[in-house]
Amino acid sequence: MLFDLFCRSDRATTQRYFSTIALTAIFFCCGSTFADVWTTLFDGKSLDGWKPTRDNTQFTLSDGVIVGSSSGQTQFLHTIEKYGDFELELEVKLHDTDLNSGIQIRTGLTRKNAKGQPRESIHGPQVDIGKSPGRSGHIFNQGNGAWITPKEDWTRNELMVNGEWNKLRVLAVGPRIQTWINGKQVADVTDDEAFAKYPSGVIALQVHGVKKTPEKARHVSFRSIRVRKIESTK
């Protein structure tokens, strides 16, 4: 038994080791390097550094986590700072399995109207979060009505555990976006067109609108949000 345990542990350590070596090689070849330290985006104590879209009050701080509540329209809570290439980690919990959520990355906050004037509008890549089984971890083009993840890769998965905390990891380097849920990779998408439109932008939490929301709102929670920038060495 002890030998089996050692072997399993040794295999896991070996896998992590070679994953790290491979990732380091990729960054070396691509002329990029991780920042030395992680930046905490949410410390469980305040919403400093975050801003809601419009005048919504759908995101609140409760017991050290950010809680998003559904309303009649989709709402967002976004970072004030913008990010280009980065690694993002956070934990998310869907309290209600009929609620869709997501994490916006490299997202724009405005569009121009017919008169050429800017108007508030959230648009850009979004890591989908939804009930299991579903398309959690795949990349949607919020505000543009299409998926960045190719249709042939729309594989539904059960990696999100409904009603429990799940760890989400996102790695965005140039036109390539990769995602993991609870340590399992979901998406690995390279889209030059999407990157040309969205090379950088805010990170945002989404709570999807629910038509004819009943008295009992749906909820999604977020915690342990951190990011580290990836700098180009070229």
Image (spheres, rainbow, N blue to C red):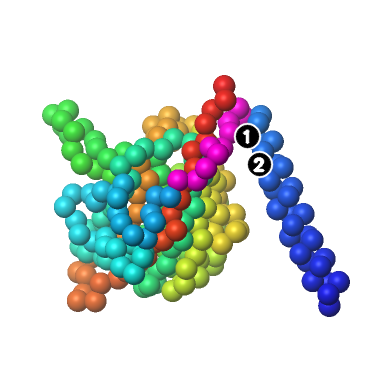
Helix, strand or loop for disc 1: helix
**Chain part drawn in magenta:** 30-39
Q: Quadrant of residue 65?
A: bottom left
Percent across and percent down for residue 148 are 46, 44
Q: Is 96 in front, or is 150?
A: 96
Which mark identifies residue 116? Answer: none
Relative vertical location of residue 34 with respect to residue 151 in this rendering, above or below: above
- Which amino acid type is shown beneath numbered disc 1? Phe
Q: Which residue is mark 1?
A: 27
Percent across and percent down for residue 161 are 50, 70
Looking at the rendered image, the quarter that the C terminus falls into is top right
Left or right: 26, with 212 as reference point: right
For residue 35: magenta?
yes
Residue in view at x 62 percent, y 34 percent: 27
Relative vertical location of residue 107 with respect to residue 165 in this rendering, above or below: above
Q: Is residue 147 visible?
A: no
Helix, strand or loop for disc 2: helix
Relative vertical location of residue 230 with respect to residue 100 in this rendering, above or below: above
Asked if the residues shown at circle 2 and circle 1 are in contact, with their CB atoms under 8 angstroms apart, the answer is yes
Q: Is 177 in front, or is 50?
A: 50
Q: CA distance from mark 2 to mark 1?
A: 6 Å
Q: Is 115 in front, or is 92?
A: 92
Q: Is residue 181 visible?
A: yes
Residue in view at x 39 percent, y 56 percent: 43
- Which amino acid type is shown beneath numbered disc 2? Leu
Residue in view at x 50 percent, y 46 percent: 38
Q: Quadrant of residue 200?
A: top left
Looking at the rendered image, the quarter that the N terminus falls into is bottom right
Q: Which residue is mark 2?
A: 23
